[in-house]
Image (cartoon, helix red, strand yellow):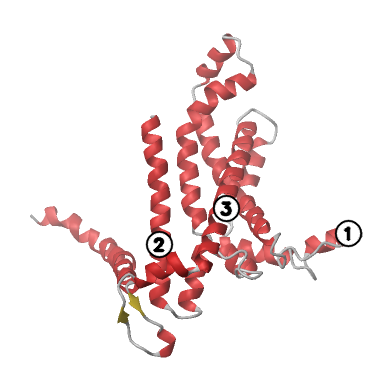
Amino acid sequence: MTKRYTGFFFLIPGVAFLLIMGIFPLIWSLTLAFHKWKAATGAGKVFIGFKNFIDILTDDSRFWNSLRFTVLYVLIVVLVELVLGLVLAYILSEKIRFRNFFRILFLLPMAAPAIGVAFIWRMLLNPDAGIVSKIFAGFSINIPGLLTNAATAPYVLMLIDIWEWTPFMFMGLLAALQSFPPELFEAASIDGANGLQTFGYVTLPLLKPIIITLSLLRVIDAFKLFEIVFAVTSGGPGSSTESLSFYAYTTGFSYFNLGYACALSWIFLWIVLGISNIVLNRFRKET
């Protein structure tokens, strides 16, 4: 009997951590989403039902602007990262000189902490003392403040994300390419297929499951866009780079409107779950 319950005893710390750090906060945030609670005023919580959710969906232009920016951001960065990762993985899966060196080199951006990467890029792009401005100035080219222009700031953030997370796509696709049996490609070559035909009719279909998996993981992660916005632009100029995560953060911890912030977070969660469900269902139907 003692041996039977020994395993459960060792599960207690993990289960307790999950409950305290995961389940309880989740339930608490859902409860707050149905309340009006502006903590900075010292007023208590007031139950208002679905009013926070209704106000967000019907009367909050800032939410829709944040959603629009986040969706555009996710679509662009995931697509570009997938294409670049696939190209790099395909090239470095071949037997070329120094390929191991380049594999390690391309993985380095992903190894750095996201918040550290964001602050480094902020310093590099500083219009007064940043190295990017100095390089252009060396060629007598004056560039505007890339992070202070609403037309360019969103795309600068996208470039930073692409630089940091293309290695994720590269690593997964490279592992998949190296796992394929070479006999498949030899058979295609014997049948007269050239390199482009082999890639289109053999390699891509084999990569389809891993492409969908990697893209789904990146979509979920990219939707949580926070560190880059927080460190580089703080949502500006104006609200041109304000993501859903950053909007929920500022609502809760700058304006202390905790009930509204929790409602924003839950709507954000439903959006991500909905997109994930659509992608997975479509993948199941095709397979």
* Residue identifier under label 2: 267
* Residue identifier under label 1: 141
**Residue 97 x %, y %:** 70, 32
Which quarter of the picture shows residue 138? bottom right
* Side (left or right) of 140 relative to 247: right
Going from N to C along the chain, the mark reached first, 2 or 3, is: 3
Which quarter of the picture shows residue 192? top right
Residue at the image position 42 percent from the left and 55 percent from the top? 271
Q: How far apart are the two marked residues, 3 and 1, measured between alpha carbons?
A: 30 Å
**Residue 236 x %, y %:** 64, 69
Q: How far apart are the two marked residues, 2 and 1, measured between alpha carbons?
A: 45 Å
Q: Amino acid at mark 2?
A: Ile
Quarter containing the N terminus: bottom left
Residue at the image position 50 percent from the left and 31 percent from the top? 207
* Side (left or right) of 75 relative to 217: right
* Residue identifier under label 3: 72
Q: Secondary structure at mark 1?
A: loop
Furthest-front residue in this view: 58
Circle 2 packing at 10 Å, graded few (<14), some (14-19), many (20+), is some
Q: Secondary structure at mark 3?
A: helix
Whether pointer 3 and pointer 1 mark residues with C-beta atoms closer than 8 Å, the reply is no
Furthest-right residue in this view: 140
Quarter containing the C terminus: top left
Furthest-bottom residue in this view: 42
Q: Marks 3 and 1: which is nearer the front? A: 3
